[in-house]
Image (cartoon, grey):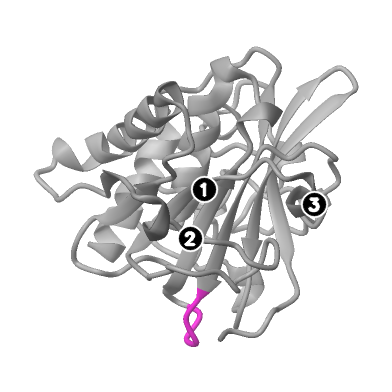
Amino acid sequence: MMKQCGMRVSALFIRALSLTLTLALISCGDRRVDNYLELSCPGVATDQSRSFMPLVKSGRPVLVLIDPSFSQFEKDQIAAAAASWNAINSVRGRRNFFEIENARPERVSVLKSGPNCDFTNGEFDTVSIVREVDSSFWSKVDTNSDHPPGITIRCPSRDGLTISKQATVINPGRAFSSQFRSVVMHELGHVLGLGHSCADPRKGETPSEKFVDCDQLPKNHPYRNAVMYPLLRIGEVKEELRANDVERGQCIAQNSL
C-alpha cells in the first residue's frame, strides 16, 4: 500500500464569466524538481525543455480502460481523443501511444479514499478513465475551483523518472458536452508525461528559462493555442492536436518508446 503524499495541482481552466472549471494534475510520491523532467528534442524550444513529467516506459501502448458507466457518446469521444494522440506516431511508423478497452467494472481503478495514489487496479502501463460524480470525492481535490471536471493522478516510481501507476477521473456533468473531447485530449497528454505548455504559478508550477511563464506569452502564441495550455475558454474546442502538442508528443515518443 502506498502512503498518501502531499498533492500539488496543475490545472486546465474552463472559464465562463464567473464560472471556472478546473482540470487538475495531481502528483504523488517521490519527486524531482516539482515532478518535471528536462528533455532535449528537435522542435522543442529551450523554454519548454522542462515541461515534461515522469514517463511511461513499457515497450507497448498504454492500455486505456474506459469506465463502462460513461455514455456511448463519451466513450466514443475518449476513443477519438486517444486516436488523435496515436496519429503522431502513425506517420513515423512507431507504435501507438494508446490502446483502448471498454472495460468491465472490475477492471477499472477504484479510488478508495479520494484523489491520491491509494487506488486499485493501477499499473505503470495502464490507465483507467473513471467516471466519478460523487461531490464528496471532488471536494477533496486541492484546486481553486469548486467545479473541477477532471483530474489525472500520477504516481512516480522511486527514481522520479518513470510512472508506477496513474488514473484519470472525469465528471461529465462539470464540463460542457461540446468540450468533453477537449478535456480528455488534455488529460491524455498528462498520461503520456506532458506537463502544461507553459507554467502557471497560481497552480504551483515554477516558471524558469526552461519552463516559460504563461503570463509572459503574447496573444495567439503557439503555446496558448496548444491542447496542453492550462486555459480553455467558454465555447473553445480543441479536438485536434496543435503543432506544439505534436512537437512535444514526438519528444515523448523518442524518449519513452
Image quadrant in which the C terminus is located: bottom left
At label 3, the amino acid type is Ser
Picture residue at 50% right of the left edge, 22% below the top = 238
Q: Secondary structure at mark 3?
A: helix
Residue 155 sits above or below residue 242 on the image = below
Segment tinted magenta in the rendering:
156-160
Relative to 105, is 143 on the left or the right?
right
Relative to 16, is 95 on the left or the right?
left
- Location of residue 34 in the rendering, given as x and y in whole percent from the top left corner: 66, 70
Residue 253 sits above or below residue 112 on the image = above
Q: Which residue position holds label 3?
A: 136
Picture residue at 51% right of the left edge, 80% below the top = 160
As measured in the structure, the alpha-carbon distance from the residue carrying label 3 to the one carrying label 2 is: 18 Å
- The reply to whether dot 1 and dot 2 touch (C-beta < 8 Å) is yes
* Local crowd size for mark 1, using a 10 Å CA cut-off: few (<14), some (14–19), many (≥20): many
Relative to 157, is 60 on the left or the right?
left
Overall secondary structure of the magenta stretch? Answer: loop
- Location of residue 96 in the rendering, given as x and y in whole percent from the top left corner: 20, 47
Residue 78 sits above or below residue 15 on the image = below
Image quadrant in which the N terminus is located: bottom right
At label 2, the amino acid type is Ser
Which tag, 3 or 2, sits closer to the chain's start?
A: 2
Picture residue at 83% right of the left edge, 50% below the top = 202
Q: Which residue position holds label 1?
A: 130
As measured in the structure, the alpha-carbon distance from the residue carrying label 3 to the one carrying label 1 is: 15 Å
Q: Which residue position holds label 2?
A: 109
